[in-house]
């Protein structure tokens, strides 16, 4: 497993975030509204987007065979757009985002049409992982 500091994230209140694992065995970019993710999952997804982006655009071998990386091959435009949604949600919550992706490298499909799990399963998984995610999902279903 490899780890490094998170890409360009300044926490709420202007303090730098602590180190995050960039690539983990359970890499995941969710296929649901980033507004439903708790802070931990939102920042984790942001890091994973950067890790996948770096592997694909840089031709890196590490984790190039990982199913989550493979899922985004040929869909860098979709990954770029997911990053934009994630970064916008981070900023909405008071995080200062300072790690844009190079739009010139955003090629391929603009839509991720290969879901790791159906959206309903992803929502159930998130609800089971984190109380804040569960509350965000409950509120959305109540509206």
Image (cartoon, helix red, strand yellow):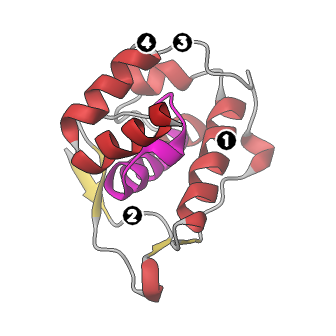
Residue positioned 67% across, 30% down in the render: 78
Per the picture, the main secondary structure of the magenta-coloured stretch is helix
Labelled pair 3, 1 in contact (Cβ < 8 Å): no
* Residue found at the far bottom of this picture: 14
Judging by the rendered image, the residue that carries numbered circle 4 is: 118
Front-most of 54 and 78? 78
Question: Could you tell which of marks 3 and 1 lies nearer the N-terminus?
Answer: 1
Residue positioned 34% across, 17% down in the render: 121
Q: Is residue 80 left or right of residue 44?
A: right
In the image, the segment drawn in magenta is: 30-53
Question: Could you tell which of marks 2 and 1 lies nearer the N-terminus?
Answer: 2
Judging by the rendered image, the residue that carries numbered circle 2 is: 6
* Residue found at the far right of this picture: 104
- Mark 1 crowdedness (10 Å alpha carbons): few <14, some 14-19, many ≥20: many
Q: Is residue 65 visible?
A: no
- The image shows residue 58, relative to residue 88, as above or below, that is above
Quarter location, residue 96:
bottom right
Describe the element under mark 1 as helix, strand or loop: helix
Judging by the rendered image, the residue that carries numbered circle 1 is: 80
Q: CA distance from mark 4 to mark 1?
A: 21 Å
Describe the element under mark 3 as helix, strand or loop: loop
Judging by the rendered image, the residue that carries numbered circle 3 is: 114
Describe the element under mark 2 as helix, strand or loop: loop
């Amino acid at each position: 497993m490899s780890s490094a500091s998170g890409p360009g994230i300044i926490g709420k209140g202007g303090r730098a975030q602590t180190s995050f694992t960039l690539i983990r065995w359970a890499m995941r970019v969710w296929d649901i509204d980033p507004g439903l993710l708790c802070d931990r999952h939102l920042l984790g997804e942001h890091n994973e987007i950067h890790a996948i982006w770096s592997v694909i655009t840089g031709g890196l071998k590490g984790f190039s065979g990982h199913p989550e990386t493979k899922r985004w091959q040929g869909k860098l435009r979709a990954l770029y757009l997911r990053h934009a949604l994630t970064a916008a949600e981070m900023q909405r919550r008071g995080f200062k985002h300072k790690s844009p992706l190079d739009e010139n490298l955003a090629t391929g499909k603009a839509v991720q049409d290969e879901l790791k799990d159906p959206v309903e399963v992803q929502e159930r998984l998130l609800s089971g992982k984190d109380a804040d995610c569960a509350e965000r999902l409950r509120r959305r279903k109540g509206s």
